[in-house]
């Protein structure tokens, strides 16, 4: 998944379906559940000192923010085919790089938006300095990117494979 300057997000069909299911849950059963929590807490009395009420309202706010994020994401989504395993780095690829030509100092990460982030693999945004630097390069090529301190760093692309989830 990636976002372009036109604010289009490219998704695989699988990712689109997963996000659509999450949105349907949040706008259906989850809204009903949070409304019930708020109503129950409201019945407890004085709202100024009602921790349960304030917690439920905060949860509702976070939930509604996620609904807006998903709605916008899905409205601007373009569903495409799964990525080809041709060794070219791009969004949705699991990339292994070696720092400064040292084949022992490697990093493997998923190049994708935070919607794909999981605890199973580190995720870097295509808009991050490293993501921008490696995007479009092929296995075996050197890529350069800018560090936060303004210096340049180079990496060698060792592997680029489509993310299997």
Image: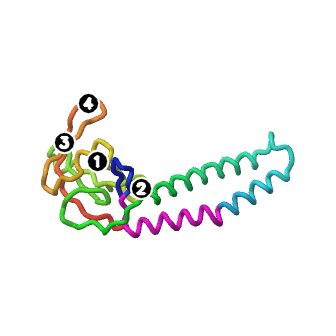
Q: Are marks 1 and 4 in contact (CB under 8 Å)?
A: no
The kind of secondary structure element at disc 4 is loop
What separation in Å lies between label 1 and label 4 (alpha carbons)?
Answer: 16 Å
Report x, y in % for residue 76: 43, 57
The magenta span reads 10-30
Q: Which mark is residue 150?
A: 4
Task: Assess whether residue 19 is covered by the magenta stretch.
Answer: yes
Could you say which quadrant of the image residue 14 lies in? bottom left
Residue 37 or residue 98, whichever sits in front: 37
Label 2: how many Cα within 10 Å (few below 14, some 14–19, many 20+): some
Sequence-wise first label, 1 or 4: 1
The CA distance from mark 2 to mark 1 is 14 Å
Using the image, determine if residue 100 lies above or below residue 14.
Answer: above
Going by the image, does 56 lie left or right of 66?
A: right
| Residue 17 seen in the figure | yes
Q: CA distance from mark 3 to mark 4?
A: 12 Å
Q: Nearer the viewer, residue 53 or 81?
A: 81
* Lateral position of residue 133 relative to residue 5, left or right: left
Residue on which disc 3 sits:
144
Q: Is residue 82 magenta?
A: no
Q: Position of residue 133 (x, y in %)?
A: 23, 45
Report, in whole angstroms, how far the alpha carbon at label 3 lies from the one at label 1: 10 Å
């Amino acid at each position: 998944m990636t976002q372009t300057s036109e604010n289009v997000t490219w998704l695989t069909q699988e990712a689109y379906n997963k996000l659509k299911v999450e949105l349907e849950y949040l706008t259906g059963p989850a809204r009903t559940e949070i409304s019930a929590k708020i109503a129950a807490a409201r019945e407890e009395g004085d709202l100024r000192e009602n921790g349960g009420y304030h917690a439920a309202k905060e949860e509702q706010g976070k939930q509604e923010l996620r609904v807006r994020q998903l709605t916008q994401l899905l409205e601007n989504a373009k569903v495409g085919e799964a990525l080809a395993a041709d060794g070219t780095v791009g969004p949705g690829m699991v990339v292994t790089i070696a720092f400064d030509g040292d084949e022992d100092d490697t990093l493997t990460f998923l190049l994708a938006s935070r919607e794909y982030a999981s605890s199973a693999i580190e995720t870097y945004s295509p808009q991050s300095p490293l993501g921008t630097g490696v995007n479009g390069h092929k296995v075996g090529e050197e890529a350069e990117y800018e560090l936060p301190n303004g210096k340049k760093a180079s990496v060698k692309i060792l592997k680029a494979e489509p993310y299997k989830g």
